[in-house]
Image (cartoon, grey):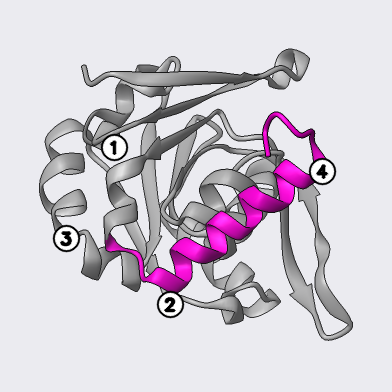
Amino acid sequence: MNSFDICKVSLGINSYKIFIGKDIHKSITEYISNYKNYSRTIVISDKNILEKNPSLFSKSLRQKIKFDQIILPQGEKIKSFKYLELIVEKILKLKVDRDTLLICIGGGVLGDLVGLASSLILRGLDFVQIPSTLLSQVDSSVGGKTGINSKYGKNLIGSFKQPKSVIISTDILKTLSNRDINSGYAEILKYSFISDKKIF
């Protein structure tokens, strides 16, 4: 097992752990409690992640687990009723039960969509976040906020759904553009201003 750090989000029965390390996506089942109790696993990602990290799916994951795969487009447009319906129907088509696990590999937009879908299907399926951008690693993957956009504004439709765990594999950041990296650093800087001088 690779070396990693653990942060715990304490929320009573909804508590979960955040695992942070290099290449830990290659052994993700070790960071999902009671993984063997799930009847099936569905991995949901977007085309961008698939293109930039082809070995993630073809080698690392398939050597460890058997899973069905759903690939969605990239971008803010998927935070909509259209894509919520699309992903829900794709998951239901696989004849899932309440012991199904959803694993989301992607940025904050995809994480918001998958998190909301997980809270709706069969009144709640477990899901795991593997955030693929610096911004999603420090922000949207933690806290349980899920949602889609409305014509009246962003994130107006959603729910709170805590993940079973968050797996942050820092090597994925090597595939990001400077713009994406800077967006993540800006969020970190914002949190440091909000918190205290020591963190800043």
Q: Magenta: predominant secondary structure element? A: helix
Q: Residues under labels 1 and 2: Cα distance? A: 22 Å
Residue 197 is one of the magenta-drawn residues: yes
The mark found on residue 73 in the picture is 2
Depth check: 160 or 1 in front? 1
Q: Residues under labels 3 and 4: Cα distance? A: 38 Å
Residue type (three-letter) at the residue carrying disc 3? Pro
Q: Residues under labels 4 and 1: Cα distance? A: 31 Å
The kind of secondary structure element at disc 3 is: helix
The kind of secondary structure element at disc 2 is: loop
The kind of secondary structure element at disc 1 is: helix
Q: What residue is at 76 percent from the left and 34 percent from the top?
A: 197
Q: Quadrant of residue 36?
A: top left
Task: Kindly give the residue lying farthest to the bottom in the view shown.
Answer: 151
Across and down, in percent, residue 50 comes to: 26, 65
- Residue on which the image places disc 4: 194
- Residue on which the image places disc 3: 54
Q: What residue is at 82 percent from the left and 43 percent from the top?
A: 194
State whether residue 45 is above or below residue 31: below
- Which of disc 2 and disc 1 is earlier in sequence? 1
- Magenta part of the protein: which range? 175-200
- Which of disc 3 and disc 2 is earlier in sequence? 3
The kind of secondary structure element at disc 4 is: helix
Across and down, in percent, residue 25 comes to: 29, 37
- Residue on which the image places disc 1: 25
Depth check: 12 or 120 in front? 12
Q: What residue is at 62 percent from the left and 48 percent from the top?
A: 188
